[in-house]
Image (tube, grey):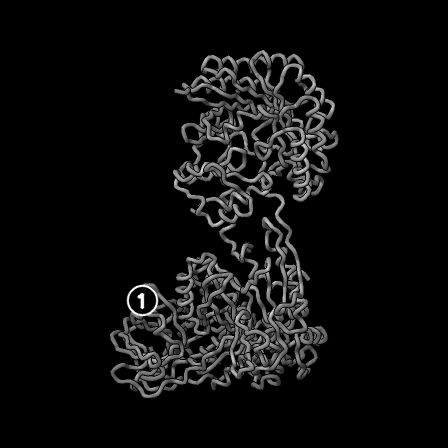
């Protein structure tokens, strides 16, 4: 029998400076606060027992690269003490281009980290400054260069829709030439209670409009295609074999455990999350998410349609939803918006940009 | 208590809107100690939530006041009335139950359009009219001039009329004295055969339909068998009572009294406002004159947002009609909106109030279509059709001529706005009739106008052009031939029947263009490009295009928080539910009312 597998997400909520658009749980913190947090993380890891084999680990944030070597070591020690790893386990850490020394890169390598996700976002100094990033183009390029000495699997994040950013694909070109194997291109989301929300409101920051973002996205998709980067999800592109196994696991209903403040988990069909503030997190407050046939149908549908893997019609049916009876199903099929193959349905990639519209029209009635 | 008819007065209060009817009613109630100070709240008779909010009276509310005058105790039955032009019908109902009317005139505004209209109604009903000048505490009060206006414009003796401030409670006793001295006592024979008029009704979940009655002859008590003369239904009385102003059961109601009666009347349709009630065992021969049924003049379609709620909508309309006989409705089917009702109203405010009551009191989500009037369509075949739903208009080739309802409009205005009002009336296809300078500060303008133009945005335009200083009133004035066409709206090539409208030919192009522009703003982008076309017959007169949706995606879906994303999609799905589909185009329900608001952006 095949061993059960699991992914691990570890949230590091610390940053040197919070970016203007960031709506994740993150903040600046002193060494003491960080130490306390890591000690608690270690306890959380010790308390979670599983027979499953770990297939991926992902350090997300915040900015995990602000962690001291000592603290990161402690976390790895705990992981090693408690879990069995798969032979080709994928271990990713998110890093920022500022203040990441070559020593630290070597240290990561030594710990077994084998994938870097670099928060490049843009290669335009003015833009970077405007959105509150602490690095510039030169720092980003230097980091990619240094990192490729130690790592093969490097991903870079880019943001679409920032003010004046009309040729994002050119950044991708530079990064790919430097050896980046994976690109995540996210469209700017302006969330309430972020500095950028106010800037947009008082017009000191002018994000691109939908039409322009759509054009940027199309250009980028075309370009990456020409570079043999496969679009395996709405915002994710990779050379063959370099897809993020960790993210794929989220979208294909694999189990995952999240450690740290605001970390989400999905285990044996149950979704839950740690509290999203430190105080409650330290009290071990866990929020159970709503979970039933209906929510699973909806999740399967949108997760599957958003990526290459598609949605299994038989699974939907087993959950009680015959999507072929949905009033929009045949129409979308006829118009080649979705297509059916081997009992699965897929969203035509052309329509990724309007996927929310399409998916909301395919959800089951209550 | 004195049982003699001589010690009863039945009266109502009439006035132009905002001249202080409800405030005076409050003071009278307070002064006669009918309600304790503790229970007293402003506009005590305006019980409907909407009435308090809008500060207007919609439903007539009766109450019994007891007042001692020259050593004798009098019973004064007060029936509060609405002032707005739409509710003339309600006014006429209360008038039929009274012998006299207090006519309030605002000391600074003077005689207004509805002052006159309501006075004529009262005179038609042979009521004794007692003028009262209110708001004399205002710095702008001009009591002597207003007295002169009352005498010259209305023709009533105002020399000794009570001059009061209902708000300040000044001289209010004079009103009570005038009621007793000037309004005649009711006539009637309490030993005769029972004869009462139903002047209002409402539905109580425990007692069934409640009839508000004025007893003209005879008496009625619990256990009596009564006959509704028009519907020919017999009921046993389970309760009679009076309003103080909340209901209070009494043993008996006699000739001259105003009160209520319940009789386990479960079927709403059995109670007809204006009907005569008599004794089932010893009936009278002739019914009371009642009052003429009013014809609705403004029509619109009302549909449930959720098609499954058709039955609930019907029940709600039935219940509203019970105490609002002027509300009419018939089932209607629209390809765009499904099953609903074409409803007839007395005016736009009436329409607005009914739709708001449906939403608030019955918790219904409804879609209303743009209001229309009723047209007389003469076909070449010789038939005449009455059409209030634009989509029922026959093809142009079958039409010989169309007549539209006309109204006589009276506008009272300070002289400086005359020019602007004339422009407005001109623009609304009005025909000038007459202009009278009442005094230095008031001019009366008379126009003939198509009703269809009045319901469009006449009132709002008049208000904004005259900064609220002009008042207006209108009455039906027959039908007139007019060059009318139907403008249809095509969405992605498919006609949307609920958006059709009938307009004058000269205005068809501009209205079509405005409507297409507005729809472009209201209808969200779809997966494909959607052309919006306005047309007359097969001829396109305006076109707009909603370009295809370019971006509707939340890019970030990682970090494992699947639930947040799912909730966002669910929310989007909920929004979709409130949309209507025309062919493959989804339209938000607000779009159907948008025709009304064409001028918002001007």
Query: Does residue B259 appear in the picture of this structure?
Result: no
Give the residue pinned by disc 1: B207
Image side of residue A129 versus residue A304, left or right:
right
Q: Is residue B57 above or below residue A31?
A: below
Q: Residue at x 48, y 57 (%)?
A: B305
Q: Residues within 10 Å of mark 1 (few under 14, many from 20)?
A: some
Residue in view at x 53 percent, y 20 percent: A37
Figure check: B296 above or below A76: below
Q: How many marks?
A: 1
Q: Is residue B284 above or below residue B600?
A: below
Would residue A329 be visible to someone looking at this image?
yes
Quadrant that contains the N terminus of chain A: top left
How far across and down, in percent of the image, does residue B54 sit? 53, 63
**Frontmost residue, B495 versus A299:** B495
Residue B213: x and y in percent read 37, 76
Q: Secondary structure at mark 1?
A: loop
């Amino acid at each position: 029998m095949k061993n059960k597998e699991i992914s691990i997400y570890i949230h590091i909520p610390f940053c040197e400076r919070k970016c203007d658009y960031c709506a994740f749980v993150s903040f600046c913190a002193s060494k003491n606060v960080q130490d306390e947090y890591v000690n608690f993380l270690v306890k959380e890891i010790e308390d979670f027992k599983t027979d499953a084999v770990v297939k991926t680990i992902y350090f997300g944030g915040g900015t995990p690269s602000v962690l001291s070597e000592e603290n990161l070591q402690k976390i790895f020690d705990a992981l090693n003490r408690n879990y069995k790893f798969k032979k080709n386990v994928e271990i990713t850490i998110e890093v920022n281009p500022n203040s990441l020394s070559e020593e630290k890169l070597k240290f990561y390598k030594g710990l077994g980290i084998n994938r870097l996700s670099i928060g490049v976002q843009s290669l335009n100094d003015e833009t970077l400054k405007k959105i509150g990033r602490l690095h510039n183009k030169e720092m980003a390029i230097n980091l990619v260069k240094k990192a490729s000495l130690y790592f093969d699997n490097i991903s870079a994040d880019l943001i679409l829709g920032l003010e004046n950013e009309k040729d994002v694909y050119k950044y991708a070109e530079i990064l790919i030439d430097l050896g980046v194997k994976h690109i995540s291109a996210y469209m700017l989301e302006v969330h309430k209670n972020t500095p950028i929300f106010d800037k947009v409101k008082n017009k000191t920051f002018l994000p691109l409009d939908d039409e322009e973002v759509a054009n940027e996205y199309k250009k980028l998709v075309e370009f990456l295609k020409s570079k043999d980067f496969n679009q395996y999800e709405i915002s994710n592109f990779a050379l063959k074999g370099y897809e993020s196994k960790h993210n794929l696991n989220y979208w294909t209903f694999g189990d995952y455990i999240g450690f740290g403040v605001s970390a989400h988990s999905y285990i044996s069909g149950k979704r839950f999350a740690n509290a999203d503030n430190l105080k409650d997190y330290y009290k071990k407050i866990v929020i159970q998410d709503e979970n039933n046939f209906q929510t699973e149908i909806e999740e399967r549908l949108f997760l599957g349609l958003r990526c290459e893997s598609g949605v299994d019609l038989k699974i939907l049916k087993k959950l009680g939803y015959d999507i072929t009876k949905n009033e929009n199903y045949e129409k979308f099929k006829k118009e080649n918006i979705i297509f059916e193959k081997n009992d699965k349905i897929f969203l035509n990639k052309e329509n990724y940009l309007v996927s929310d519209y399409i998916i909301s029209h395919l959800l089951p009635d209550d | 208590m004195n049982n003699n008819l001589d010690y009863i007065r039945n009266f109502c209060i009439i006035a132009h809107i905002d001249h202080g009817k409800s405030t005076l009613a409050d003071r009278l109630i307070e002064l006669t100690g009918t309600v304790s100070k503790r229970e007293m709240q402003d506009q005590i008779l305006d019980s409907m939530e909407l009435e308090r909010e809008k500060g207007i009276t919609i439903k007539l509310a009766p109450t019994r006041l007891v007042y001692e005058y020259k050593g004798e105790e009098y019973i004064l039955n007060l029936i509060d009335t609405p002032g707005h032009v739409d509710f003339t019908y309600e006014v006429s109902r209360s008038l039929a139950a009274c012998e006299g009317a207090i006519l309030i005139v605002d000391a600074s505004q003077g005689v207004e359009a509805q002052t006159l209209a309501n006075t004529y109604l009262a005179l038609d009903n042979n009521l004794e009219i007692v003028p009262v000048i209110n708001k004399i505490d205002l710095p702008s009060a001009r009591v002597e001039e207003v007295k002169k206006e009352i005498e010259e414009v209305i023709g009533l003796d105002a020399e000794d009329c009570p001059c009061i401030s209902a708000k300040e409670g000044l001289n209010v006793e004079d009103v009570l004295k005038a009621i007793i001295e000037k309004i005649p006592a009711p006539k009637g024979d309490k030993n005769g055969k029972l004869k009462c008029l139903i002047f209002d009704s409402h539905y109580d979940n425990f007692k069934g339909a409640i009839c508000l009655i004025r007893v003209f002859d005879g008496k009625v008590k619990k256990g009596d068998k009564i006959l509704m003369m028009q519907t020919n239904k017999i009921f046993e009385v389970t309760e009679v009572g009076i309003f103080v102003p909340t209901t209070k059961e009494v043993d008996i109601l006699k000739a001259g009294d105003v009160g209520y009666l319940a009789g386990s009347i479960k079927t709403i349709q059995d109670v007809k406002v204006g009907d005569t009630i008599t004794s089932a065992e010893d009936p009278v021969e002739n019914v009371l004159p009642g009052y003429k049924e009013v014809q609705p003049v403004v029509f619109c379609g009302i549909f449930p947002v959720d098609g499954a709620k058709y039955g609930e909508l019907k029940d709600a309309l039935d219940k509203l009609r019970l105490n609002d006989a002027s509300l009419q409705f018939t089932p209607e089917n629209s390809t765009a909106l499904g099953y609903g009702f074409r409803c007839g109203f007395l005016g736009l405010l009436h329409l607005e109030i009914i739709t708001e009551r449906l939403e608030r009191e019955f918790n219904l989500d409804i879609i209303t279509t743009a209001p229309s009037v009723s047209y007389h369509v003469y076909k070449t075949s010789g038939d005449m059709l009455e059409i209030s739903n634009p989509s029922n208009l026959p093809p142009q080739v079958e039409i010989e001529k169309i007549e539209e309802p006309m109204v006589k409009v009276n506008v009272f205005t300070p002289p400086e706005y005359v020019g602007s009002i004339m422009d407005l009336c001109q623009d609304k296809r009005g025909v000038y009739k007459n202009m009278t300078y009442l005094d230095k500060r008031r001019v009366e303008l008379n126009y003939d106008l198509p009703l269809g133009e009045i319901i469009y945005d006449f009132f709002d335009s008049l208000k904004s052009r005259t900064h609220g200083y002009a008042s207006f009133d209108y009455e039906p004035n027959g039908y007139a031939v007019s060059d009318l066409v139907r403008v249809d709206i095509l969405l992605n090539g498919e006609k949307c029947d609920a958006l059709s409208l009938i307009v004058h030919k000269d205005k068809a192009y501009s209205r079509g263009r405005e409507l297409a522009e507005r729809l472009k703003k209201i209808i969200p982008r779809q997966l494909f490009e959607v052309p919006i076309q306005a047309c007359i017959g097969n001829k396109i007169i305006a076109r707009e295009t909603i370009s295809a949706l370019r971006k509707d995606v939340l890019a970030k879906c990682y970090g494992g928080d699947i639930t947040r994303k799912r909730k966002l999609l669910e929310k989007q799905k909920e929004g979709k539910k409130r949309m209507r589909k025309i062919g493959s185009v989804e339209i938000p329900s607000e779009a159907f009312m948008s025709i009304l608001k064409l001028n918002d952006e001007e």
